[in-house]
């Protein structure tokens, strides 16, 4: 009789595979990664990896889901911390991520979104839409919380501001990956971004 495997053990193994897969996707991108690469990086057998994932696409979607948890965590309001400061912490993290853009999933994401399997069957990848909606919802909630607490006086709907934030940062990251931070002038662009957020949110701490 085979020994029963605990749920904690399964979670740990899945985490190990995803962590290894993330390193591979960063190093090789999406299109050049095969399951053997992930097995080699994780130091696991074919059977061990296939027990959790069906193929490279499946692994990549779960890596995205894994990464998204950290992003969503930034938009959980902290009652002891001004929400404007919380947003600025998030912007600072984005700046750090852009600084390390060559060691990120930007290339893998771009390749996946341009892959024929995704382009011709988007309905088969519901999490791609879901992750965008989750991020918009999380950002909108934190803006609304700031409004309810009297910290913000938004000039636009929170959802519109959230979508703008996502689009701006995604575009800046992709451009910087392609052209380099010197060309895209990342610090100056982020200063402009913060200025636009001030104009849209009117933080109470910055009122004259």
Image: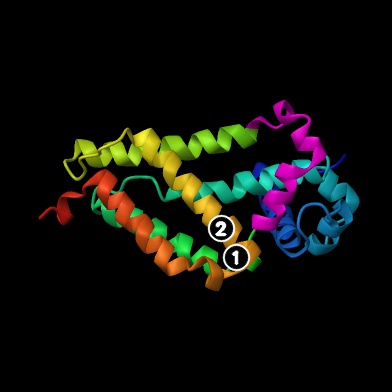
What's the distance in space between the residues labelled 1 and 2, CA to CA?
Answer: 7 Å
The residue labelled by disc 1 is 101
User: Which of the two residues, 187 or 5, is positioned nearer the viewer here?
Assistant: 187
Q: Is residue 88 above or below residue 78?
A: below
Q: Which residues are magenta?
A: 105-126
The residue labelled by disc 2 is 173
At 38% from the left and 56% from the top, the residue drawn is 193
Q: Are marks 1 and 2 in contact (CB under 8 Å)?
A: yes
At 26% from the left and 49% from the top, the residue drawn is 199
Magenta stretch, overall SS = helix
Residue 90 on image: x %, y %: 40, 56
Q: Quadrant of the N terminus?
A: top right
Q: Is residue 124 magenta?
A: yes
Position of residue 121 in the picture relative to residue 200 (left or right) = right
At 58% from the left and 51% from the top, the residue drawn is 67
Q: Residue furthest bottom?
A: 182
Tag nearer the camera, 1 or 2: 2
Q: Quadrant of the C terminus?
A: bottom left
What is the quadrant of residue 123 in the picture?
A: top right
SS at mark 1? helix
Q: Is residue 74 magenta?
A: no
Is residue 53 in view? no
Q: Is residue 183 above or below residue 22?
A: below
User: Which of the two residues, 4 or 25, is positioned nearer the viewer here?
Assistant: 25
């Amino acid at each position: 009789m085979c020994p029963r495997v605990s749920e904690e053990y399964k979670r740990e193994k899945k985490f190990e595979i995803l962590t290894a897969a993330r390193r591979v996707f960063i190093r090789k991108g999406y299109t050049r990664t095969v399951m053997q690469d992930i097995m080699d990086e994780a130091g696991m057998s074919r059977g061990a990896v296939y027990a959790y994932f069906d193929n490279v696409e499946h692994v990549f979607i779960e890596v995205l889901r894994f990464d998204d948890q950290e992003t969503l965590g930034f938009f959980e309001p902290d009652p002891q911390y001004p929400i404007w400061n919380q947003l600025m912490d998030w912007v600072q993290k984005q700046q750090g991520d852009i600084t390390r853009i060559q060691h990120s999933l930007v290339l893998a994401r771009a390749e996946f979104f341009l892959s024929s399997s995704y382009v011709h069957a988007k309905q088969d990848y519901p999490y791609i839409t879901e992750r965008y909606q989750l991020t918009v919802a999380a950002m909108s909630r934190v803006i609304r919380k700031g409004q309810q607490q009297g910290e913000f006086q938004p000039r636009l709907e929170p959802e519109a501001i959230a979508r703008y934030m996502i689009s701006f940062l995604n575009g800046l990251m992709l451009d910087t990956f392609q052209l380099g931070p010197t060309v895209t002038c990342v610090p100056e662009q982020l200063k402009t971004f913060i200025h636009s957020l001030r104009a849209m949110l009117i933080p109470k701490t910055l009122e004259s």
